[in-house]
Image (cartoon, rainbow, N blue to C red):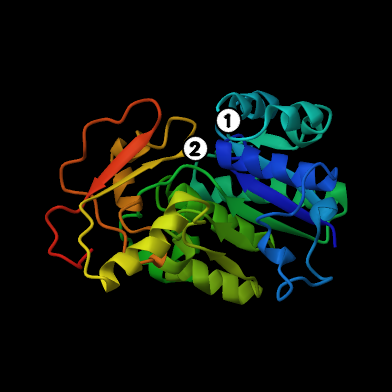
Amino acid sequence: MRTGVWLVGARGSVAATSVIGALALRAGLVGPTGCVTELPGLRHPGIPGPGDLVFGGHDVSSTPLAKKADALAVAGVVPAWLVRALHDELPAVERELRPAPEAGDQAGTAELIGADLTDFRRRHGLDRVVVINVSTTEPAPEPHPAHADLAALEAELPRSRTLLPASALYAYAAFGSGCPYVGLHPVDPVARLPALDQLARRQGLPYGGHDGKTGETLVKSVLAPMFALRNLRVRTWSGINLLGGGRDGGQPRRAGAQRGQDRPASSGCWPRRSATPPRAPPASSIWRTSATSRPPGTW
């Protein structure tokens, strides 16, 4: 089944790493280590393989995908030899990346997003397109009555430029275009906004997400319950975000963004950051989260 993968944030580190991995699998340069769908209980002929995937996407950045891949290789995130081996493959993906569209209102922007999705599906003869949001974490949206009802949302979007955060607007456009949606944000827009859930159900489309847990968050989500069960007090988390490109450590200090990362991925056990953010981390993107004010065994 030929499947389109439309990446929101397609020129970022997570997207570039995913594309490199898929292309390397397709070319037989690496094995399927870490591919959950290769487990015996999940392997199924209906699941598309690397050769069935076609990549495209939107981004506000104009950094070429090959340049991002080179930067990831220099940082040691992906092997340099692998990037060199895929030198002739990356331009085909690059041709499918588009600037993030923007109209005078959010209804118009959603239409432009949907037009790109429809064109992508048509040109490649795809059986389906899945929209995956791997863009920068954003704050939870401010409450609005239109978030609770699809009819109210559809009536309000033509009059607003800010009603939905970007992730929610992409989910709205994806569902309207017949595409499933997966969000890797800690703040899942569909789960938080009933109007989007109503649209997905009306269209008969699945959605998922609520933090991809691709690395450090996964490890912390496993360790934190163990610490609590052993009545151990977590004073500080310390970690290095390899896929952040040196930016993720600073991203939570953007106005409001930290609210989107306080409680990742429904784990319910990551210690909240203190009210006063820590001193700015160095370029290595080390980020510390303090739980020193919490009683033992709490989070």
In the displayed orientation, state which residue is furthest to the right.
125
Quarter-wise, where is residue 72 in the image?
A: top right
User: Which quarter of the rendering shows the N terminus?
Assistant: bottom right
Give 280 or 41, whichever is nearer the viewer.
41
Give 52 or 151, whichever is nearer the viewer.
52
- Residue 83 percent location from the top left of the image: 73, 30
Residue under pointer 2: 242
- Residue 297 percent location from the top left of the image: 20, 68
Cβ atoms under marks 2 and 1 closer than 8 Å: yes
Around disc 2, counting alpha carbons within 10 Å, would you say few (fewer than 14), some (14 to 19), or many (20 or more)? many
Q: Give the mark nearer the N terminus: 2 vs 1.
A: 1
Which amino acid type is shown beneath numbered disc 2?
Answer: Leu
Residue 191 sits above or below residue 61 on the image:
below
**Residue at the image position 84 percent from the left and 28 percent from the top:** 88
- Residue 246 percent location from the top left of the image: 44, 30
**Residue at the image position 48 percent from the left and 47 percent from the top:** 166
What is the tally of numbered marks visible in this picture? 2
Taking the image as shown, residue 110 lies to the left or right of residue 64, namely left
Quarter-wise, where is residue 253 in the image?
A: top left
Residue under pointer 1: 76
Give 41 or 141, whichever is nearer the viewer.
41
- Residue 171 percent location from the top left of the image: 55, 58
Tell me, yes or no, if residue 193 can be seen here.
Answer: no
Residue 40 sits above or below residue 73 on the image:
below
Which amino acid type is shown beneath numbered disc 1?
Answer: Gly
- SS for callout 1: loop
Look at discs 2 and 1 and give the one toward the viewer: 1
Give 218 or 56, whichever is nearer the viewer.
218
Taking the image as shown, residue 241 lies to the left or right of residue 58, namely left
Taking the image as shown, residue 34 lies to the left or right of residue 157, namely right
Tell me, yes or no, if residue 245 can be seen here.
Answer: yes
